[in-house]
Image (cartoon, coloured by chain):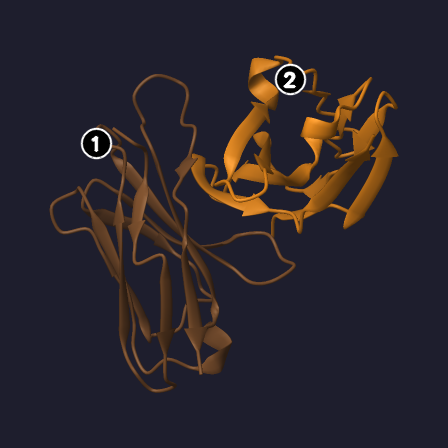
Chain colours: A brown, B orange
Amino acid sequence: DTGVSQDPRHKITKRGQNVTFRCDPISEHNRLYWYRQTLGQGPEFLTYFQNEAQLEKSRLLSDRFSAERPKGSFSTLEIQRTEQGDSAMYLCASSSTAGRSYEQYFGPGTRLTVT
Amino acid sequence: AQRVTQPEKLLSVFKGAPVELKCNYSYSGSPELFWYVQYSRQRLQLLLRHISRESIKGFTADLNKGETSFHLKKPFAQEEDSAMYYCALGRDAGGTSYGKLTFGQGTILTVHP
């Protein structure tokens, strides 16, 4: 297991297009998180799943954003009708609720540029 | 609402000097606090968490509930400590343990030779 992986690593798209990102968590982890990070800021929470259930979604997240984790393994984050303000690094993390660790392990991120 | 503040965006010290990265939080309940680090071209990783009270790579952090602070300290900085450091609050307003993380803006630490 090489840790959390994300695909693609970079995405350039034109304003108005839809994009989808994928995250593969560490295999035994039941929690999966999505964050967004813009230049000069810390990561900002978007949503998280426990198994296939989406437990929380940020109120800052517009209706253009949707995330799924259909089988409790990998997750996808889709942005519809992209805007220039969506340009950011999108980070995925995973953790396990077993034991007391709950440490979140982060992926390398997907950098989105909307032109 | 919960909030994490890191007042210094940049911090420069010389090798061997003590270093302190400041973190203040705002949270009405019992906080769970973490320090994450991101070295150049690497992914974000956990450095330490307050509940374990451990020292990692010579860094320590003490939770001060009276001052609502969780400052990160190291007595003798090394060049390899140069990185971006984020303080994070790990308990949401509903009291759910270890859900989302609320991050500060980060502090870039540069240790000069």
- Compared across the picture, whether A62 is left or right of A68 comes to right
* Figure quadrant of the C terminus of chain B: top right
Tell me, yes or no, whether dots 2 and 1 are on the same chain: no
Q: Is residue A56 above or below residue B22?
A: below
Front disc: 2 or 1: 2
Amino acid at pointer 2: Lys
Residue type pointed to by label 1: Ser
Element class at badge 2: loop
What residue sits right under mark 2 in the picture? B57
- Between B7 and B77, which is closer to the camera in this rendering? B77
Which residue sits at x=59%, y=46%? B103
Q: Is residue A104 in view from this perspective?
A: yes
Residue B37 against residue A69 in the figure, above or below = above
- Whether residue B96 appears in this view of the structure is no
Work out whether B24 lies above or below A22: above
Residue B86: where, in percent of width, then height? Answer: 63, 41
Chain label for disc 2: B
Residue A80 placement, left or right of A70: right
Q: Secondary structure at mark 1?
A: loop
Please identify the residue farthest to the left as the structure is shown. A71
- Residue projecting furthest to the front: B113
User: Where is mark 1, residue-wise?
Assistant: A27
What residue is at 25 percent from the left and 28 percent from the top? A1
